[in-house]
Image (cartoon, rainbow, N blue to C red):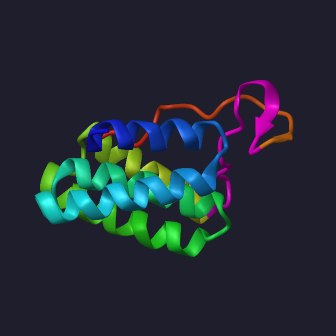
Amino acid sequence: MTLGAQHNHAWALYLLGRFDEADHEIRRVAETYVRRFGPEYPIVLAARQLLSRTRAALGHLEEGIALMTDVVERRERGLGPELPFTVASRRLLAEYRSGRWQPPRPPGGWRGGVCGAGASGGLSSGSGP
């Protein structure tokens, strides 16, 4: 499977509430991206943004905040402060810090084999570049 496919697979796992699996996969993808492209490359930042989401979803909010702070700073420097991906990253970081952020709830209410209520997470600030 290509790195891009693994990245997309990790996003799908995350949306399905399979946070442990998504975390493991996106961590490997992000590390490989960094070795291949360097830490500033947009796809690296997209993977690290998804890693921040999985870490936060697993209860490691401070780690998620640290990752997103780094992603926002790098996106502002490399892509500019007004690029939609930068704006979305800043918004996600603000949600983390405010306590408003919630991990996605998969369609049908299933999350990691446990039934719960709620709608699926949106893609508005996704893990895109």
Q: Give the x, y percent position of residue 107.
A: 72, 25
Quadrant housing residue 6:
top left
Is 35 located above or below residue 126 in the figure? below
The span shown in magenta is 98-112
Residue at horizontal 41 percent and vertical 68 percent from the top: 67
- On screen, residue 65 versus residue 83, left or right, reads right
Task: Please provide percent x and percent y for residue 25.
Answer: 45, 53
Residue 89 drawn above or below residue 31: above
Residue 13 coordinates in the image, percent (x, y): 56, 41
* Quadrant in which the C terminus is drawn: top left
Q: Is residue 106 magenta?
A: yes
Question: Along the horizontal axis of the image, is 21 left or right of 128?
Answer: right
Q: Is residue 102 magenta?
A: yes
Relative to 110, is 58 on the left or the right?
left
Q: Is residue 12 visible?
A: yes
Q: Is residue 18 above or below residue 73?
A: above
Q: Residue at x 25, y 60 (%)?
A: 32
Query: In the displayed image of the protein, which residue is found farthest to the top?
Result: 108
Q: Position of residue 22 (x, y in %)?
A: 53, 50
Name the residue rendered at 79%, 24% in the picture.
Answer: 108
| Residue at screen point 47% across, 32% down | 124
Q: Quadrant of residue 17?
A: top right
Quarter of the N terminus within the rendering: top left
